[in-house]
Amino acid sequence: MDRRGVMMVVSSPSGAGKTTLCDGLRKAHPDLIMSVSVTTRKARTGEIHGEDYYFVSIDEFNKMQADGELLEYASVFGNQYGTPKGPVAKLLEKGKDILFDVDWQGASQLSHTCGNELCRVFILPPSAKALNERLSGRGTDSLEVVAQRMSEAAREISHWPEYDYIIINDDLEKAQEEINAILLAERAKKQRMLFLRDFVDDMLQNL
Amino acid sequence: MDRRGVMMVVSSPSGAGKTTLCDGLRKAHPDLIMSVSVTTRKARTGEIHGEDYYFVSIDEFNKMQADGELLEYASVFGNQYGTPKGPVAKLLEKGKDILFDVDWQGASQLSHTCGNELCRVFILPPSAKALNERLSGRGTDSLEVVAQRMSEAAREISHWPEYDYIIINDDLEKAQEEINAILLAERAKKQRMLFLRDFVDDMLQNL
């Protein structure tokens, strides 16, 4: 039955438990696909083209960007990263749900290019104290590095109003249940169940 | 923490499993409150005012209706039924989630009076065949009664596009998981978490 996939965007400041929750979500929904980015950075040993990233040249990246083939893009430490439009469109048409692990800038760009296809989830730490503790690490980092992390976390957090769902990760089990439920609920949204009109017409004709 | 409750509206043709699913939902979420209607019909033995219904006189009902104190109302077999505004508003403010078991007409009226407070769920049977079997009953009802039920079911089903979420009840366990997930997800929606702005401001000040 034709169903349109969910584009699930998850953001959070680092140290709020996003990776754990996304791993748990993929375990609960093994058919959920991680979005694969294009990047201009060199492949590291063991990284597979098309699986970890699509590795492209700077020229190729610039052409994709100019041709509007990137749903979002960003520059990180001098390397370009972006989400290619083609694979996402194909997966959504096939009814596959896709997980986008992006920051607020990526989420904001996706909102402009993909509008109401998105389901945007923001994960908050339970308190400043908890976040402080997690970001301070094992006490081996310089005060400067910790301060830099804090200010990045604060900037990320300030963008929570741009998301649809907010999960406060004060109880990992509860937070996991919530993010799993969000995906399940989004799947049941009328606009994604493209087969419904025919399904109901057929039912009414046979009543 | 201040959270605004969810108004969850569930409709379906009879024979699609709504009662079973709503019972299961209330078991999974014991804090979910059933909306209590006002009615002009006489209380039956054992029925408790304020629990099963608010029993009112026709004059009282008409006054409530005229004063805009009913979120929706309908006439069934000569008796008036309606949803009073006051108790619902109070529960939502307290962060209590409320379940409304209404037909498409009730859902439509609630949509006009309560707008985006609502989360509207429609339950569909898996097929015309399955619905036919359930509505035909034990073969003891007259053809006329069965035909009447079918035509009511068809009318109800035709209103599915007015709902937000559609559950096809072809697997009770899966359908139960879906309706439970919808409530959990709706609770995590940003607009219902009224405490978030203060919560985040406080967190940012203490980072």
Image (tube, coloured by chain):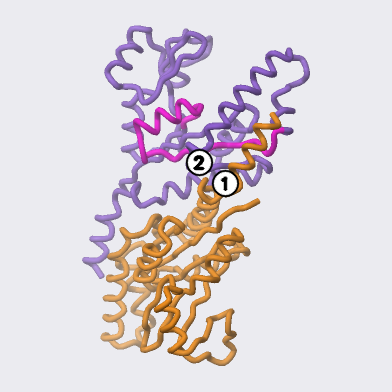
Chain colours: A orange, B purple
Write the start and end of the magenta stretch as one range. Answer: B100-128
Q: Give the spatial CA distance, label 1 vs label 2.
A: 13 Å
The amino acid at mark 1 is Glu
The verdict on residue B80 being magenta is no
First in sequence: mark 1 vs mark 2: 2
Does dot 2 land on a helix, a strand or a loop?
Answer: loop
- At x 68% / y 14%, what residue is drawn? B145
Q: Quadrant of residue B205?
A: bottom left
Subunit of label 1: B
- Which part of the image, by quadrant, shows the C terminus of chain A? top right
- B138 w.r.t. A101: above or below: above
- A178 w.r.t. B107: above or below: below
Q: Are marks 1 and 2 on the same chain?
A: yes
Residue A181 location (% of width, % of height): 52, 53
Residue B123 location (% of width, % of height): 58, 37
Does dot 1 land on a helix, a strand or a loop?
Answer: helix
